[in-house]
Image (cartoon, rainbow, N blue to C red):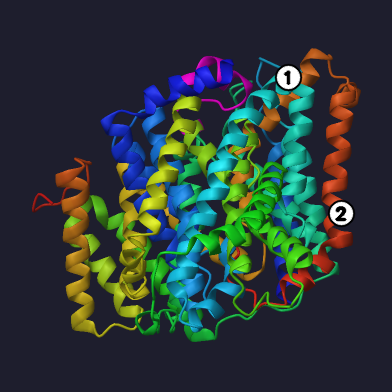
Amino acid sequence: MSDRVFGGIGVVLAIFFIWQATLIQESFIQDAVGPKVFPVIIGTVLGLSSLYFVLKPDPEPSWPRFGGLAEIGFAALVMVIYAMALPELGFGISTAIAAAYITWRLETPPLKAIIAGVSISAGLYIVFRLILGLSLARGPLGF
Amino acid sequence: MDVLGSLLDGFAVALTFENLLLALIGCFLGTVMGALPGLGPSNGVAILIPLAFTMGLGATPAMILLTSVYYGAMYGGRISSILLNIPGDEPALMTTLDGYPMAQQGRAGEALALSGIASFFGAFFATWGLVFLAPLLVKVALLFGPAEYFALFTLAFATLGGIASRNQAKAAFAAALGIGIAMIGVDGQTGVPRFTFGEVHLYDGIDFLVAIVGLFALSEVFIFLEHRASGAHKGADQVKIGKIIPSWSLIKYCTPTMIRTTILGFVAGVLPGAGASLGSFISYSVEKRLVDRKGTFGTGDPRGVAAPEAGNNAAAGGALVPMLALGVPGSGTTAVLLAVLLALNITPGPLLFTQNPDVVWGLIAALFIGNFMLLLMNIPMVSLFVRVLMVPPRYLMPIVAMVSFVGIYGISGSSFDLLVMVGFGVLGWVLRKLDVPLVPVILGVLLGAAMEKNLRRALTISDGDWSTLVASPLSITLWVIAIVGFILPIVIGPMIRRRMAIRRKDEEGATVD
């Protein structure tokens, strides 16, 4: 079933891709093939292979239960927030929070996870900023 | 001989303090990453790419660092195979068969030492193979025009699923997805934006480093979150290592095995789409058929440890041949290394040998030096790495995630790239669940633009006549190999898989080398 859904999404994606390819504005500079043909070929391969999974799906993979899916979803959400907060809060604070979250979710008691988060953040800051001289995001506190 | 002359020049490049230090760091980090279950050679190299860039390393030092990681990971994979019966990475799967039984008999130290020597043997002679074979392949590659290159790229995609591929449609899907992603951005030939939806960030296209780190490193973190890091690391401390000096008679006993499997592994590495996993698998099964008269393979036969280790390390060297000489990688890790070269503005392929001989030969010389470092690290100092195995993944995985973010942010300084990377991380997790191989996606993102460029150049030369793609005997040969390579796994794949499945196959190990 998963494969059929996946194949269905693939077919829709392929049709969308080919449709978008036909909308590409042609330029006055032109070669024999143009910018549209190759994407259309690729879109076709994408569509045909997706059609194959719809018709001949593999055995069902073991999806996690709802809790597992929520786990992945929240982790991705934390990472998205991390990416957006990085320029605002700076490297030190955001990294400590994000690392503590992931450590906590990997079954570490909360207090230990916070310590781990802070140490990971500090450790990376020392290695990357102080030793290697990389430019990390600066926050209001200067780190 | 001019090859040896070039190699000597290479040693002059490699033997600087900076390069030796980088090789040492690379070998050490590589062994650690190889040893840790879940981090294989391709993830290991992917995580360290941003580091190499942000340190502002030049092309040669960066390649020396990253290929040392690659070789190191190949050595390191055996440690957890032998001690824990968990392959540290995919190619080390076959080493569990005889390595773990040896450890249970209290001969863990011997198994570690012997496999270290076998790894050295395989890698050392494969590097010699690289020295002699790559320049020969370059001579062939100089005959390639755009049409032949297009056929060669198709061949690389068609065979990348590998002989043991489960579902060729999924491999094709993955490749098309990757190439499709590569189409995003301004078209290099006519200057028109494609698939950008008016988003300015997309005009530059999607950076393949972002895609690689997301697909390999972040998706690994998600896999661990899903399984909550369950019990993979128990018991490392209970294993007695025993003496770590193997007797001469044992080495002598295994030498014929090592010679045979080095050759097999090297050939498997050079062939497109095979890679180190197949190298170790073929080595083990052929050796079992040849010398296992008393049925001791699988119960702790030292030759069963030496065979896959020599095989996979030789394959690792072999896989560098098509990557350097043709610019078309044969395995996942070499695809990642290719990304590094492209990002450093160096185009691998025949011209690399004439335009940047210092990079090629410096790299090869560094591989020889790295091999000796690895031998020293992996035999007398092996207990150090055994201790690393005890770092629980719940502390390790957050570090992996954060290093990925730091690295990508360090290159571009843009939150948008980080968001794209998280997107690739989730995509990588879903694709792994659905058993879609990730390596073709990466290769597509990497090579899609070059593939299209060659197609369009070929057709511009022929003035729009598509038959130019099959006009030369060389391109016809490449097309035939591509078609056979795509269809063969459908016919004989189930057979090989059944044999590989005799041992529990790690379902999550979807980043096949």
Query: Which residue is at the front of the view, A41 or B32?
Result: B32
Residue beneath the point at 36% across and 28% down: B58
The answer as to whether the residues below labels 1 and 2 share one chain is yes
Q: Position of residue B145 (x, y in %)?
A: 75, 19
**Is disc 1 in contact with disc 2, using a CB cutoff of under 8 Å?**
no
* Disc 1 chain ID: B
- The three-letter amino acid code for the residue at tag 2 is Leu
At label 1, which amino acid type do we have? Arg
* Residues at marks 1 and 2, CA–CA distance in whole angstroms: 31 Å
Which residue is located at x 78 percent, y 63 percent? B290
Give, as a single range, the part of the protein colored magenta.
Answer: B342-358
Residue underneath mark 2? B488
Q: Quadrant of residue B351?
A: top right
* B444 with respect to B471 (left or right): left
Q: Quick check: is B346 in the magenta stretch?
A: yes
Q: Position of residue B315 (x, y in %)?
A: 62, 48
Where's the C terminus of chain B, which quadrant? bottom right
- Residue at the disc numbered 1: B457
In which quarter of the view is residue B256 placed?
A: bottom right
- Quadrant of the snapshot with the N terminus of chain B: top right
Residue sticking out furthest to the left? A141
Q: Is residue B268 above or below residue B184?
A: below
Instruction: Measuring from the top left, give residue B480's x and y in whole percent.
Output: 89, 38
